[in-house]
Image (cartoon, rainbow, N blue to C red):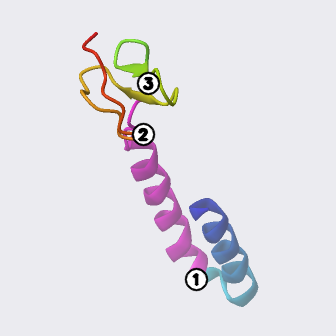
Amino acid sequence: MGHLIFLLLHLVAVIFGLWLLALTLPLHLIYSAVRANRKREPGPTFWTHVRCPDCRELVLKGAKVCKHCGCRLSPQ
């Protein structure tokens, strides 16, 4: 979504004056670099999560109660 906004800003800058482009291009590059460096949280894996026997939702392996249905879980 952020890239679309910057592309629209670049278009406006070209229409109304190239001096605005000197402002939007560096901001877009900074935004892209910061966004690329952000680490994403890893999703559930076989080693970190198990399926609840009652509702079949993924829960942490160390959980004692399913956060989705409240079912008591046996330790793995």
**Between discs 2 and 3, the one toward the N terminus:** 3
- Residue 43: quadrant of the picture: top left
Residue 9 lies left or right of residue 47; in this view the side is right
Q: Is residue 44 visible?
A: yes
Q: Which residue is mark 3?
A: 52
Element under disc 1: helix
- Between marks 3 and 1 in the image, the one whose residue lies nearer the viewer: 3
Q: Which residue is mark 2?
A: 69
- Mark pair 3, 1: CA separation: 59 Å
Q: Which residue is mark 1?
A: 19
Q: Which residues are magenta?
A: 20-44
Quarter placement of the C terminus: top left
Q: Position of residue 47 (x, y in %)?
A: 36, 12
Asked if residue 43 is among those painted magenta in the image, a careful observer would answer yes
Please name the residue shown 26% across and 27% down the image: 63
Residue situated in front as seen by the camera: 72 or 50: 72
The answer to whether mark 2 and mark 3 are in CB contact below 8 A is: yes
Please name the residue shown 66% across and 73% down the image: 10
The local crowd at label 3, few if under 14, some if 14 to 19, many if 20 or more residues have their Cα within 10 Å, is many
Residue 57 lies left or right of residue 75; in this view the side is right
- Mark pair 2, 1: CA separation: 58 Å
Q: Position of residue 48 (x, y in %)?
A: 34, 19
The answer to whether mark 2 and mark 1 are in CB contact below 8 A is: no
